[in-house]
């Protein structure tokens, strides 16, 4: 099946180098190979492929050349720039990687002006519904909360398989990818950090508290968290503040790209699923259309909190509160309705009998149905 990014990447193949990043095993290689039947594929993890890359001996009669995990090559950007500048396109070039590419995209480097970047996320309710044409959105959401959205375990559909897959998936990231890229030696401590985060999804994260639990410094904890972000294991959501510098100093929340990693109550899993769906759509709109949106949560001095706030060009346009069964509008959501009259106020409820809208335009919606069809304004 074509993934949600496929038509947008195809449109750009003849214009620029395509950098396709995202979590390991989200289907990047499968997507890349499906872009054109005439392709040549090289994986830097393979010894024979590394030699052929050094020789630059790929089949130039092919329409598409795919370089997988190329970011593990020393000076890969300079190497790729040389190919693009001397040979150009065709053949089209797609570079895929489970880490780093997004980080490199944000920094000035020698590939500037020569590439378009895309981030592939796991499956979510909207993409699954679009592919399957099913109306059973609640069933899709329940399966995502249990098995996560990575294609292989989701399509397998068995909890036992997912648990085995999850362990293998994390082992590859920590013991192969992470060590290769960062030369990290504290793998056991990072594993413990992940276990601590699994139980704290949706809550404020204290770096000093994690440092105490792990018997290390705050600075070390922040470095490890950055590594996990770069490897697409977790992502950070900051509290909204008009001055971003102040927001950076406040306690963030962390969520997992693999929803099934979340331990604890169903409310935490549901909040993580909504966070993933919102971030996926934000990245999609940025990568494919150049639109500027960002994801935060809201917390006041009186400790009134709203789970998510979407900003467009730095102005709040959507407030989202997430509940499992409570169909009474959140007091925080009601209070913000007056302060931000132009922003959409939404409470997503997993188990909801009747949808409703209040005079101040606060909406109560079924989570599964909304996640299956939403479009960020």
Image: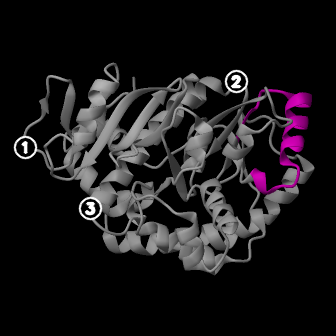
The kind of secondary structure element at disc 3 is helix
The C terminus - image quarter: top left
Q: Which residue is mark 3?
A: 266
- Compared with residue 176, is residue 127 higher up or lower down, i.e. above or below? above
Which badge, 2 or 3, comes first in the chain's sequence? Answer: 2
Assess whether residue 78 is covered by the magenta stretch: yes
Q: Residue at x 57, y 34 (%)?
A: 243
- Compared with residue 307, is residue 38 higher up or lower down, i.e. above or below? above
User: Considering depth in this image, is 146 or 158 the residue closer to the camera?
Assistant: 146
Q: Can the viewer see residue 3? A: no
Assess whether residue 89 is covered by the magenta stretch: yes
Q: Which residue is mark 1?
A: 353
All told, the count of numbered labels is 3
The kind of secondary structure element at disc 1 is loop
**Picture coordinates of residue 213, whole percent (x, y):** 54, 78
Q: Which residues are magenta?
A: 70-94
Q: Which residue is mark 2?
A: 14
- Near mark 2 (Cα within 10 A), the count class, few <14, some 14-19 or many ≥20, is some
Q: Is 67 displayed left or right of 136 in the figure?
A: right
The N terminus - image quarter: top left
């Amino acid at each position: 099946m074509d993934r949600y990014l496929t038509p947008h990447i195809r449109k750009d193949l003849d214009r620029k180098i395509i950098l396709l990043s995202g979590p390991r095993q989200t289907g990047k290689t499968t997507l890349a190979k499906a872009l054109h039947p005439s392709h040549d594929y090289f994986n830097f993890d393979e010894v024979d492929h590394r030699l052929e890359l050094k020789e630059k001996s790929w089949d130039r009669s092919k329409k598409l050349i795919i370089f997988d995990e190329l970011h593990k090559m020393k000076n890969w950007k300079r190497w790729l720039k040389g190919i693009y500048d001397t040979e150009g396109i065709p053949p089209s070039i797609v570079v895929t990687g489970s880490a780093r590419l997004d980080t490199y995209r944000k920094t000035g480097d020698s590939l500037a002006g020569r590439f378009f970047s895309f981030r592939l996320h796991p499956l979510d309710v909207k993409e699954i519904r679009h592919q399957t044409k099913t109306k059973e959105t609640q069933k899709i959401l329940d399966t995502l909360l249990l098995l996560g959205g990575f294609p292989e375990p989701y399509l397998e559909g068995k909890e036992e398989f997912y648990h085995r897959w999850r362990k293998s998936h994390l082992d590859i990231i920590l013991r192969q990818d992470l060590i290769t890229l960062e030369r990290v030696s504290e793998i056991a401590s990072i594993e413990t950090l992940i276990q601590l985060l699994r139980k704290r999804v949706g809550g404020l994260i204290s770096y000093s508290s994690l440092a105490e639990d792990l018997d290390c410094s705050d600075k070390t904890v922040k470095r490890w968290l950055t590594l996990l972000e770069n490897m697409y294991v977790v992502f950070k959501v900051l509290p909204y503040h008009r001055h971003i510098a102040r927001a950076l100093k406040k306690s963030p929340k962390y969520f997992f790209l693999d929803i099934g990693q979340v331990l604890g109550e169903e409310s935490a899993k549901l909040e993580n699923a909504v966070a993933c769906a919102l971030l996926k759509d934000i990245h999609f709109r940025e990568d494919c259309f150049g639109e500027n949106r960002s994801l935060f949560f809201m917390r006041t001095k009186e400790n009134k909190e709203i789970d998510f706030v979407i900003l467009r060009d730095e102005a709040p346009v959507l407030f989202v509160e997430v509940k499992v069964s409570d169909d009474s509008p959140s007091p925080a959501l009601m209070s913000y309705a007056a302060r931000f009259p132009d922003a959409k106020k939404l409470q997503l409820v997993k188990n909801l009998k009747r949808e409703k809208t209040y005079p101040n335009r606060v909406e109560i919606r079924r989570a599964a149905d909304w996640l299956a069809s939403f479009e960020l304004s």
